[in-house]
Amino acid sequence: MSPDPAGSTEGGARRLSPARVLDVDPLLEDPATRIVVCCGSGGVGKTTTAAALGLRAAERGRKVVVLTIDPARRLAQSMGIDSLDNTPRRVKGVDDAAGGELHAMMLDMKRTFDEIVEAHADPDRAAAILGNPFYQSLSAGFAGTQEYMAMEKLGQLRAKDEWDLIVVDTPPSRSALDFLDAPKRLGSFLDGKLIRVLLAPAKVGGRAGMKFLNVGMSMMTGVLGKVLGGPFLKDVQTFVAAMDSMFGGFRTRADATYKLLQAPGTAFLVVAAPERDALREAAYFVQRLAAERMPLAGLVLNRVHGSDADGLSAQRALAAAENLEDRGIVDQGDGKAGSGNSPDTHGSSTRDSSTSDDPGDSDDSDSAVFTDSTDSTDTTEPVDRLTAGLLRLHAERMHLLAREQRTRDRFTARHPEVAVTEVAALPGDVHDLAGLRDIGARLATARPELPETGIEEADAEAEAGA
């Protein structure tokens, strides 16, 4: 039986070998690194990670532009910019002592498409294309257009050679793989068989073209006309005729950008949360990057929960909470019996201690004894309840840590070659440069938030529950 490459077994408990640690600063400071692509599934913090990396690189002397495709505009808010658009804008408040600069921009999908048309068509043809209804639909929301235009904009930025480093925040797609697949899909569509068939009549021209359209395409156009509608089909054919000279360029640029992503100066960072679905997609993306020979720098495990009291297990915390709650019930019964029903409370000992024969003084003394006993009980019970509640909250946190740790360890066992850095979950959203600077420091510190060995009690409970 071959040894377990992920770790060993001691006393029945599995011990995983520590994962490779991702060192972010050398990556950002290396002049050979020209592009950093932050990718991963939606909602894992890609935008914040990209902005934090860009800020950290700029404050270490590099001229950086961060390209985001996030429609929530959190990047603009965190950088103190009223709005971002298709033009890089300089971010103020960056420490430029090392000579660096930080610029930020947000992809305008339609504007980028318009720029491609204007750059590769004469003014009359460009005007016809930009005014075509099918083009307007295609450029505004056709499947894959956003990802394709992100690649186009990346190619444009890199071609200018104006920035030392380009940090890309990939689109919030349902699948991280869309970022790699969409450029080829859209390029294939724009240079595919359907487009060539629709383009054929325009190439033949005049009556011959109409004759060809009527004879050779009557069946197909009849079906398409019923499905899409006659006016729409006409718009498509007009668009295809106007774009004739540009179709080959889409595929050529898509291929060129794809090769740029494979180049040694590019580094991919997969961002994921310590959750099963997010890490499953991250693992799939790691495999895809390897298959496409694209350089993977490592994994950013974001929003990881930690605890400085992980020496107290969930099982022990719950046992202590139950003991406190049970003792509170017993103490409450004894306290009431002793203070309210015991004859000693109104007995001779109390009255003997009184120096006054006034019945009022005796009543005050009795009342004082009763009040002291009640205050003691009322003070103890809330403290016990509060302590028990805190212990239960701690047990929940330990269960969460155990679940996140198992998920992380499963990933590192399957992909021991992937370097990992962990970033702690913060109590609130990042909304300024100070917050981004803090995230950047956490990224570079590479301090593991989760312990390297199993939280045995919680782990055993989870295994039993499974």
Image (cartoon, rainbow, N blue to C red):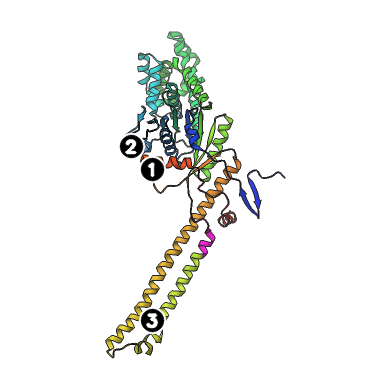
**What number is the disc on residue 340?**
3
- SS at mark 1? loop
Of callouts 3 and 1, which one flags the residue occurring earlier in the amino acid sequence? 3
Q: Residues within 10 Å of mark 2 (few under 14, many from 20)?
A: some
Q: Residue at x 48, y 12 (%)?
A: 212
Residue type marked 1:
Val
Q: Residue at x 57, y 54 (%)?
A: 459
Q: Which residues are magenta?
A: 304-319
Q: Residue at x 52, y 64 (%)?
A: 319
**What number is the disc on residue 430?**
1
Say if 251 sits above or below 19 in the image. above
Furthest toward the front, the residue is: 97
Residue type marked 2:
Gly
Q: Residue at x 38, y 26 (%)?
A: 110
Give the x, y percent position of residue 251: 49, 21
- SS at mark 2? loop
